[in-house]
């Protein structure tokens, strides 16, 4: 443990202490500001911007300084009525005036215009058909849509820019440098509707690694079909762990016919790709690949340079104690200046829809409410939408949802945004859809100049600074998070519960008790602290919070842990199919009623980090279901029967009992039950698989945090006890449970059912293994203190009645959470063997041994009886017989004991538990078959929708309407069915958003399988059978190799070093280093000790003195031919690096290089169906590849997609007739473009 803590301290010293801006580091931020800006791209700074921005914008508008009359600008109301054009407006208004478009007037933007400011109370229309030139801009000190004003902008084919100047003009409500709307009265309804050229996708993932020096990349989606163009800028996220990497920016130089992208320069970094197929109980793979985001749009909203302005101590504080103002730069203990760019806001009413724009140089650091995109107190706003936008270079957060419900934030990319990327502000926001967004920080967290993407001086140090900078930050959990990805931040997502609301709803919201909405398909990777993160006490309850109450809790009694009968108010929910990798931590502080279903966590320092939890309100659910963990510690919580079900643990997975228990006041008695049901333990590591706590952070010795029971579920345990074996069991053959070695009485039981685990090395941390189940027995005490508390004497008559001397006994020390009188969590705990035939007697070591009648005793857990079978034990306290004449069962009364956020209400003492004097009745048994054995789905409310939503949709709990499920398009096309994966492949597209099927790596293959649809198994075809539990892995469609377990080598893993090498006691790695470097392909250990490490050109033959204990392949397997098209089989390169004669799939075989494609003459071509049919074409493959006759088919990669008949541009629809027919301008038939 101390090594563990030392490593953590080193990591955080390197990543945090000497990195990132803290709230008090404004001076450092200002000193580095110019360097930060130099590293931040902006169109107006680009020397080639004349090609990307409307002509004349920069010389006309950029950084022209304050207007001479900014203090008292003249106001001009445009006259003329009806429709006025740019020239008409310019003739009345100018750069020195506030131009007002009155109600009843439509301003048709058809040419560029420069104004002092613009107020819209009528309409603005800005569309392609109106524009006189291909590029048009509007410049103003602010743009304000008021009253019933409308801003309608739809530019698809041309370019447009809104430029917000720093000319000193200030709107009374939106303030300076603003673009936005404001509803002053309840009857006002201003609207903003901006639509730039739609990209089918704004981001994708690398399909293949991009190594340093490479300049061509393959994405999961065809760049042509995504709508990407030559000249677009793209960013590639870091794939390094724990915020230690850097992203890179490129310009697209070329896009091939097949959609691969050529970059304008070679990559500087290596970008790895790992697609992990679903494990047992899972349906979705882990897509561990860097995001590639498109940073270019045809509409840009930008403005003048940032300005640092001095603070004013007299400005009103908008939120008490936050030291910020909406009126300007307010002085604070941590702020002397504010950094001001332009900002946008839709304020107090109306609606805003902003789509497919580029936003840069936005945000006003230190001024409250001034961000890049901002829904501000719009109430219920189902028409509100931020979609497809690119935000780059903000200095105060990115997208904010504040006091708004039912809005959508979708498909946006946030790159180099300082502070939180997406921010949900006050805690009352409900049922907003936050989906398919990418937040990526391109700077290392410990970069001495850029300091990651942190920023000091805002109103929230948690979300924006080194404290807990977050990609997505939310005080409200009843909002859908679907398919989002965050890379290289400090936290991926951060649910900051524990408060009571903020701002106008302060004291009106039970943040910790809000119901969890849909949290599914998100990926958090490479973050310096947490990926998935819920901070505070997260225990959802059935409260009266709703959109109708504006997200407020009216009846606060419903937020309490117990109802009047002492039963918990919890509501069970699930986080589904989320992936965490390369983070420091994953999980929660205190949280309950949250099931992690389908969770993938790989190579996190802690794959799970959880302090306290509770059993599920439904009485049946497991905490981890169908999950997969490898290469990282799982820090498991206290105070529940923590059920791990149908979950896979791979190499490097380690289980930690009682994480954080008795650190501060965390934990209770540090004795949870960890129940393993249908668990697949595939960790082949010979080192430690788990560990108990053995440290003390308290100022006393009453610390027994070494508790916790690991045990198989009753049916799994019974299989073992009946002589059977479980495949991939966590336990050695014959054993079913494990506890700390501190409970030595188990070693004295008749028949020796338990042993010390040292026979298995340090794998079980020296704990006690038992052939019988173990359960927890807890005694909650009152009014004891650490220095005088007695011991608890336990005596057991094993398998017989309580007569004569006990078979075994032990003195159990007192346990106390925190210091004396610091908490009421105290008592005793121990493992017991369940069974009515066993008799346990408890007494104190002091006085006559009587245990006070007010103390509460708890045996096992009701969930065990609900899921499987009620358990029994005979128990007496001194001479008092508990339960029914001593017989106690696991369903005994537990009212008022533990709700997660409440512990032992006054009503509990002496009135509940297994030994209460008045013998309260048992709790009712739950029929778990009625709740699908506790398998929880993402949040939905089918009872609210009048009609069934069908297979492609779910009934949304906020809007009470059917919404499309992940993986389906609005046209109800199943993107996973489009991939047509075999039974050994899993669809990659489900949580990627958009309507476009994946065209590369569309199917993620199970190990041993290959092919674009995972239809080939070269292991079977080649008859490769790996020995010694080695695994066969496909290396192409036609080749495979064995992956050997540690300590084995050879083509079939047939060679073992056991009995040859003597280092490390004869155990792997035999005293050698198993990871010397990438160029080492052979690792050898010696018979008398010693190690050898050889590169490929110096490989040695083994003999009696030397043995290869690890080897890397020497075959040319990294070189494969040809994966450009699905219809050509991938094969290993020849030894000289050349490609063999290609082999093609037969015509009619399904393929994915083209959406819904079929093979035609060795090329994947679109089938005769529509591009996105409502159902995929039915193709019956032959299952066997063919080698076409060279005279009738290609022998090299085709450069164009096949066409039928004579056509042009590789497009079947572009026939000769279309090619030769002139295009006519319908407005002027004399004008044609032949």
Image (tube, rainbow, N blue to C red):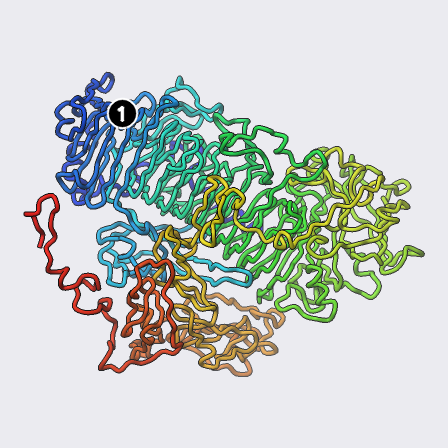
- Dot 1 falls on a residue whose secondary structure is loop
Please identify the quarter of the rendering in which residue 545 is found.
top right
Spot the residue most to the right. Answer: 804
**Disc count in the image?**
1
Q: Identify the residue under disc 1.
A: 121
Left or right of 1217 on screen, residue 582: right
Task: Give above or below for 988 relative to 243.
Answer: below
Q: Residue 52, image x and y in percent?
A: 19, 44
Quadrant containing the C terminus is bottom left
Left or right of 96 on screen, residue 14: right
Q: Residue 1134, image x and y in percent?
A: 33, 79
Q: Residue at x 50, y 46 (%)?
A: 518
Q: Residue 660, image x and y in percent?
A: 62, 45
Please identify the quarter of the rendering in which residue 323 is found.
top left
Q: Residue 558, image x and y in percent?
A: 62, 33
Nearer to the camera, 8 or 430 = 430
């Amino acid at each position: 443990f101390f090594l563990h803590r030392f490593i953590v301290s080193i990591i955080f010293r390197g990543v945090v202490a000497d990195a990132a801006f803290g709230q008090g580091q404004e001076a450092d931020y200002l000193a580095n500001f110019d360097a930060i800006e130099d590293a931040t791209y902006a169109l107006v700074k680009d020397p080639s911007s004349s090609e990307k921005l409307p002509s004349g914008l920069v010389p006309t508008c950029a950084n022209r300084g304050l207007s001479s009359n900014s203090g008292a600008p003249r106001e001009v109301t445009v006259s003329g009525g009806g429709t006025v054009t740019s020239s008409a407006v310019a003739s009345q208004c100018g750069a020195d005036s506030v131009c007002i478009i009155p109600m009843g007037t439509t301003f048709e933007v058809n040419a560029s215009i420069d104004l002092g400011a613009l107020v819209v109370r009528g309409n603005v229309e800005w569309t392609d058909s109106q524009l006189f030139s291909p590029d048009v801009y509007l410049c103003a000190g602010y743009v304000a849509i008021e009253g019933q004003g409308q801003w309608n902008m739809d530019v698809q084919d041309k370019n447009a820019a809104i430029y917000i100047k720093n000319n000193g003009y200030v709107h009374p409500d939106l303030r300076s440098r603003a673009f936005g709307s404001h509803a002053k009265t309840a009857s006002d309804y201003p609207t903003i509707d901006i639509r730039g050229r739609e990209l089918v996708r704004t981001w994708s993932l690398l399909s293949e690694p991009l190594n340093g020096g490479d300049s061509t990349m393959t994405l999961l989606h065809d760049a042509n079909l995504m709508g990407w163009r030559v000249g677009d800028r793209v960013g590639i996220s870091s794939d390094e762990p724990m915020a230690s990497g850097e992203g890179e920016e490129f310009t697209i130089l070329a896009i091939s016919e097949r959609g691969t992208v050529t970059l304008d320069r070679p990559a500087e970094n290596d970008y790895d790709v790992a697609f992990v197929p679903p494990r047992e109980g899972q349906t979705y793979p882990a897509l561990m690949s860097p995001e590639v985001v498109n940073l270019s749009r045809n509409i840009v909203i930008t403005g003048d340079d940032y300005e640092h302005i001095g603070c004013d101590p007299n400005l009103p504080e908008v939120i008490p104690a936050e030291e910020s103002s909406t009126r300007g730069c307010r002085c604070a203990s941590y702020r002397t200046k504010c950094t001001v760019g332009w900002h946008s806001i839709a304020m107090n009413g109306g609606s805003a829809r902003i789509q497919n724009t580029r936003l840069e140089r936005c945000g006003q650091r230190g001024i409250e409410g001034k961000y890049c995109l901002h829904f501000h107190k719009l109430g219920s706003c189902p028409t509100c939408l931020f979609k497809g936008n690119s935000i780059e270079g903000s200095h105060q957060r990115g997208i904010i949802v504040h006091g708004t419900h039912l809005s959508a934030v979708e498909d946006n990319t946030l790159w180099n945004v300082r502070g939180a990327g997406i921010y949900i502000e006050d805690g009352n926001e409900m049922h907003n859809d936050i989906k398919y967004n990418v937040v990526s920080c391109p700077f290392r967290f410990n970069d001495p100049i850029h300091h990651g993407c942190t920023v000091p001086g805002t109103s929230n140090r948690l979300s924006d600074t080194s404290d807990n900078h977050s990609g997505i930050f939310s005080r409200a959990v009843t909002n859908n998070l679907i398919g989002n990805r965050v890379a290289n931040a400090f936290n991926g997502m951060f649910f900051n519960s524990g408060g009571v609301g903020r701002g106008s709803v302060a004291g009106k919201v039970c943040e910790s008790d809000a119901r969890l909405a849909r949290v599914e398909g998100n990926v958090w990777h490479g973050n310096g602290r947490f990926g998935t993160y819920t901070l505070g006490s997260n225990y959802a309850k059935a409260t009266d919070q709703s959109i109708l109450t504006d997200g407020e809790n009216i009846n606060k009694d419903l937020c309490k842990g117990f109802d009047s009968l002492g039963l918990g108010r919890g509501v069970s929910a699930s986080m589904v199919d989320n992936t965490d990798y390369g983070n420091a931590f994953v999980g929660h502080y205190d949280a309950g009623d949250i099931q992690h279903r389908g969770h993938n966590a790989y190579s996190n320092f802690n794959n799970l980090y959880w302090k306290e939890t509770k059993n599920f309100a439904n009485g049946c659910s497991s905490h981890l279901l169908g999950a997969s963990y490898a290469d990282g510690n799982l820090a498991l919580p206290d105070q529940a029967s923590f059920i791990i079900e149908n979950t896979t643990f791979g190499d490097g997975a380690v289980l930690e009992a009682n994480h954080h228990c008795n650190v501060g006041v965390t934990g209770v008695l540090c004795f949870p039950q960890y129940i393993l049901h249908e668990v697949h333990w595939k960790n082949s590591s010979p080192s430690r698989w788990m560990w108990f706590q053995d440290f003390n952070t308290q100022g006393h010795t009453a610390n027994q945090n070494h508790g916790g029971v690991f045990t198989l579920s009753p049916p799994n345990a019974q299989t073992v006890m009946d002589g059977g074996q479980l495949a991939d069991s966590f336990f050695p053959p014959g054993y079913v449970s494990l506890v700390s070695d501190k409970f030595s009485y188990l070693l004295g039981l008749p028949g020796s059912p338990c042993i010390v685990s040292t026979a298995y090395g340090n794998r079980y941390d020296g704990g006690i293994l038992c052939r019988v189940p173990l359960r927890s027995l807890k005694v909650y005490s009152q009014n004891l203190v650490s220095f005088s508390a007695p011991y608890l004497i336990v005596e057991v008559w094993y398998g017989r009645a309580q007569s004569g001397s006990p078979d075994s006994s032990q003195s159990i020390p007192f346990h106390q959470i925190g210091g004396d009188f610091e908490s009421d969590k105290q008592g005793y705990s121990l493992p017991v063997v369940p069974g009515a035939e066993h008799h346990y007697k408890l007494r104190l070591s002091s006085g006559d041994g009587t245990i006070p009648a007010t103390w509460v005793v708890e045996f096992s857990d009701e969930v065990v009886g609900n899921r499987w079978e009620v358990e029994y034990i005979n128990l007496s306290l001194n001479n008092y017989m508990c339960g029914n004449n001593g017989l106690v069962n696991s369903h005994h009364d537990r009212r008022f004991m533990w709700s997660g956020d409440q512990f032992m209400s006054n009503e509990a003492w002496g009135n509940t538990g297994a030994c209460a004097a008045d013998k309260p009745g048992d709790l009712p048994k739950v029929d778990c078959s009625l709740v699908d054995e506790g398998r929880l789905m993402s949040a939905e409310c089918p009872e609210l929708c009048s009609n069934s939503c069908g297979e492609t949709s779910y009934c949304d709990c906020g809007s009470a309407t059917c919404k499309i499920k992940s993986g389906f398009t609005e046209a109800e096309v199943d993107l996973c069915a489009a991939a047509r994966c075999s039974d050994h492949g899993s669809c990659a597209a489900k949580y990627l958003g958009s309507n476009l099927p994946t065209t590369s790596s569309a199917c993620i293959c199970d190990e041993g399988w290959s092919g674009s649809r995972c239809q080939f198994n070269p292991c079977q075809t080649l008859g490769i059978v790996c020995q010694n539990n080695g695994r066969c892995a496909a290396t192409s469609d036609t080749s495979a190799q064995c992956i050997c377990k540690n300590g084995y080598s050879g083509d079939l893993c047939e060679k073992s070093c056991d009995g040859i090498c003597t280092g490390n006691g004869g155990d792997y790695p035999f005293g050698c280093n198993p990871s010397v470097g990438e160029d080492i392909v052979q690792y050898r250990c010696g018979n008398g000790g010693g190690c050898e490490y050889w590169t490929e050109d110096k490989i040695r033959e083994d003999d009696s003195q030397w043995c290869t204990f690890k080897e890397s392949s020497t075959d040319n397997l990294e070189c494969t031919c040809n994966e450009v098209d699905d219809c050509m089989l991938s094969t290993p390169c020849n030894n000289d690096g050349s490609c063999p004669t290609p082999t093609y799939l037969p015509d009619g075989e399904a393929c994915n290089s083209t959406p819904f494609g079929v093979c035609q003459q060795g090329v994947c071509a679109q089938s005769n169906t529509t591009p996105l049919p409502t159902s995929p074409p039915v193709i019956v493959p032959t299952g066997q590849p063919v080698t076409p006759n060279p005279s009738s088919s290609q022998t090299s990669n085709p450069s164009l997609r096949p066409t039928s008949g004579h056509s042009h541009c590789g497009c079947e629809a572009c026939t000769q007739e279309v090619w030769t027919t002139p295009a006519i301008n319908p407005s002027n038939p004399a004008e044609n473009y032949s």
